[in-house]
Every structure is written in structure tokens, then in C-alpha cells.
Amino acid sequence: MSRNTISRQDKADTAPGLVRLALEMRAPWELGIALAAYPFVKSAPRGDGHPVLVFPGLAAGDVTTVVIRRFLRDLGYDAHAWEQGLNFGPRPGVLEACVEKIRQLRQQHGRTVSLVGWSLGGVYARELAKMMPDDVRLVISLGSPFTGSPKATNAWRVYQLVSGEKEIDEARFAALKQTPGVPTTSIFSRTDGVVAWQCSVEQETATSENIEVHASHVGMGLNPTALYAIADRLAQPEGDWKRFDHKAHTGIKKLLFLDPARSSWPNPFFGLY
């Protein structure tokens, strides 16, 4: 592993332990920190007005992505909810409705659509980008389990219950590991208490990358560093996307955005590893 890259980890076959799971209780604190850190978050690059579609996580709905969407609208983006109710997995008609939504936004704006997905929502975003590369500008996922073992998550039993899928479709799950053909960013946390962080590590290429933040899984979409990273990535000029440059950050940004190729370290804001 080089200093400036991180290899995809396919060996994660167990869910995060009890300590990391217990740390998920810090999610409300992350919301408070996000409010207190507004001046920092407000310094994120401004948007260019292009449409952004935001997908919620497992068993969650659009209310959970309100902070992300409001933040992006304040920056100048036309942010939209997925409007498919609670995310209970690939139910009949949901994927088709998402395809139609992307096509409508593309036609309405005359511009490609960026996709942002939290947890299972990130899996949706990645798969839709593979299906519609000419309509999607870029993809950003937050704590999304697209590689490793499908059981390396504390939400696996919940997924089985709400989706009705009792058995693992090995072929379909293996296909999730494929990187979309558009610029792709995976935002992950080594202190994720729901999804083993290795399951959210993208194979890094000239158009795909990983950004490490210090956040809980259920609080990732409220976390100020994750919000800043989302804004930074969406602000990349279309057709001139460049990887997140950790070396370019100084001061507090350098502290908060650790190069994921380095070893883990304790963070005073969001707990210890």
C-alpha cells in the first residue's frame, strides 16, 4: 500500500464489534457539532446549480437526508429526495422509479445528475450510475457496503427482515464491487459501528477514490467533515474531475481529513478507535 492510495479490502467477513456499535450513540452529538461547525462547513466550495439526487439508508426515508439536501441547496445545488418511501431494498418498481427520476432531472436541467447515497442508498447510487453513465455526473457514497462479505454489517438481519431476502444472491452481490464508470467517491469511517469499514473501500483509480472521516454510521450524513467532503466533490468541474487532495489541506482541514492510506489515529471530536 502506497502513501497516497488505499487498497480495497475484501476480507472483512465480520460485523463491527460491540465497542464500535456502542459508539453509534454519538450520532446526536455529531448533529450538534455540525451546527456548531457551521462556519467551517459554510466554507465549502459553492455549487454550480446542477441537480443532485440523495438516497437514504436502510429502513430510512427522505427525512433522514434533510440536512444533506438543505446544505446542498444552501450551496446552490438543486438537491432532490428520492421520494420512494422507506428504503427496504430492491422492491418491485423502486429501481425503475429512480431511473425515471434521473431522466426527468436530466431533461429538466439539460445537465447530468450527481447521485449521493447514504449506506444502502449509496449502493443504489452506484448501481444506477452503472446503468445510466450518460445521465450521471458523479457518485458519492457514505458508509455503503459494496464489497467484502454481505454479513460484515450489523444491519444484515434487519435487511433480511425488511427486504424479504433470506438468502444471499452471490452473483448479484459480487457485481456490486464493480466500480461505476463515472467519477466515484466512497466516504467511510473506521469507527463505523454498523458496516465494517473495509466493505466501503473503493478500488482507487484516476476516477475513483476514498475519503476517510471520523463519524458514526447513523450520523455520517450529519457529520460536518462528511458534509464538507460531499460539497468538495460535487464542486469538481464536469469533465475535469480530480481526486481529493489531502496534501492541499492545512490547519483544521488537515487534521480532520486524514489520508486514508495512513494508519488510524484517535480523533478528539468523534471518539477513539
Image (cartoon, grey):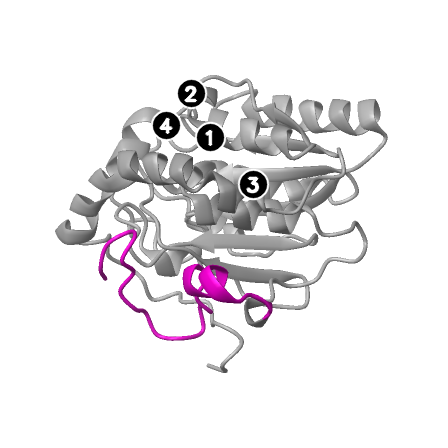
Q: Which residue is mark 4?
A: 163
Looking at the rendered structure, the kind of residue marked 2 is Leu
| Mark identifier at residue 56 | 1
Q: Residues within 10 Å of mark 3 (few under 14, many from 20)?
A: some
- Residue 32 sits inside the magenta stretch: no
Image quarter of residue 132: top right
Q: N-terminal of the two: label 3 or label 4?
A: 3
Q: Residues within 10 Å of mark 4 (few under 14, many from 20)?
A: some
Q: Residue at x 34, y 49 (%)?
A: 215
Question: Mark 1 to mark 2: distance in Å?
Answer: 8 Å
Q: Residue at x 40, y 26 (%)?
A: 88
- Residue 254 sits inside the magenta stretch: yes
Rendered location of residue 232, percent (x, y):
62, 50
Question: Mark 1 to mark 4: distance in Å?
Answer: 15 Å
Q: Nearer the viewer, residue 228 or 103?
A: 228
| Mark identifier at residue 41 | none
Looking at the rendered structure, the kind of residue marked 4 is Ser
